[in-house]
Image (tube, grey):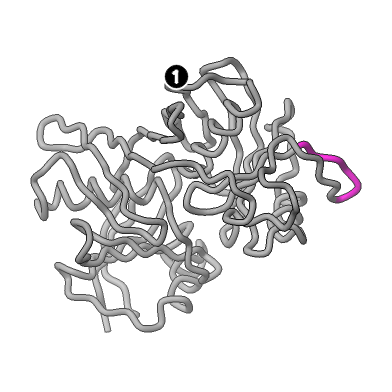
Amino acid sequence: MKVNFTKMHGCGNDYIYFDCINDNIRIDNINELAIKLTDRHFGIGSDGIVLILSSNKADYKMRMFNSDGSEGNMCGNALRCIAKYIYEKKHILNDMISIETLSGIKYLKLKIKDNKVIDVEVNMGKAILDTSLIPVITDKPKFINELLYIDKKYFNVTCLSIGNPHCVIFMDNVNELKIDEIGPKIEKYKLFPNRINTEFVKVCSKNRLIMRVWERGSGETLACGTGACASVVASVLNGLCEYEKEITVVLKGGKLKIKYSKDGTITMRGPAEFVFSGEVEI
């Protein structure tokens, strides 16, 4: 069966999108299909695939699958891309959109110019610091600036969830990091029963971070929206940045603007772009 798809990216974090509502698509072999289509040599190539679905709780529903076929709870970059897609395809004409995810309903505000979405702000909800909910196997209620011994090295880490689990590590030599070596070891470390996304962060100033990310199920990606949020939250919790300030997170694929409020709410602002559309056999 041939179906339509659209490839989009947010700061280089690219996904293959299937409009399951308007194109009347039903995909049964989604896990195997994700592995096949995301291959950058033998498939379309992407960090994962995203299904745009109907919802009885919000305007739309999102399901996203990583390149290894596993399902993720949330993706901030994908949320912005869905918002751009449904607005510019004229499926919805409001500049406020709600999208259901496995981590709850997220609310998005679109910045529109000449009928094009040039920027999307997402209310990401509140950071989860309770170790039992992240989860982290520990007797500590929170895991902030704790020592981990991995690969014969000590790392100071801060763990939290932004709908999916994150481990933030601050360092100066982010660009020289051999992320392909250390990333998988942290992802599958014994304290993280559901695996974990890892952000390696350099704090340049109180309003600017540089971040590289190793995503569970996908490896290093050019950007991660929830990872950028986690990096800002961890920076504030460790006294490196401030509450209520919009902080620029510089990723390999672009920049995101993140604000962490004193009430625990996180907002993310950034772009979304179309790459190309086509037809594929599934």
Vertical order, 232 against 218 (above or below): above
The percent position of residue 201, horizontal first and vertical second, equals 64, 32
Going by the image, does 99 lie left or right of 229? left
Residue 43, quarter of picture: bottom left
Specify the quadrant that holds the N terminus: bottom left
The percent position of residue 279, horizontal first and vertical second, equals 26, 70
Total marks in image: 1
Q: Residue at x 31, y 53 (%)?
A: 105
Q: Residue at x 57, y 52 (%)?
A: 165
Overall secondary structure of the magenta stretch?
strand
Q: Residue at x 62, y 56 (%)?
A: 132
The percent position of residue 125, horizontal first and vertical second, equals 39, 43
Stretch in magenta: 151-156
What's the amino acid at mark 1? Lys
Q: Residue at x 26, y 79 (%)?
A: 26
Magenta stretch contains residue 88: no
Residue 57, quarter of picture: bottom left
Determine which residue is flagged by label 1.
Answer: 245
Going by the image, does 180 lie left or right of 264? right
Badge 1, how many Cα within 10 Å: few under 14, some, many 20+? some
Look at the numbered disc 1 and give the secondary structure of its residue.
loop
In the displayed image of the protein, which residue is found farthest to the top?
205
Q: Nearer the viewer, residue 82 or 252?
A: 82
Q: Nearer the viewer, residue 112 or 4?
A: 112
Vertical order, 78 against 190 (above or below): above
Specify the quadrant that holds the C terminus: bottom left
The percent position of residue 50, horizontal first and vertical second, equals 36, 62
Q: Nearer the viewer, residue 152 or 233?
A: 233
Going by the image, does 44 lie left or right of 151? left
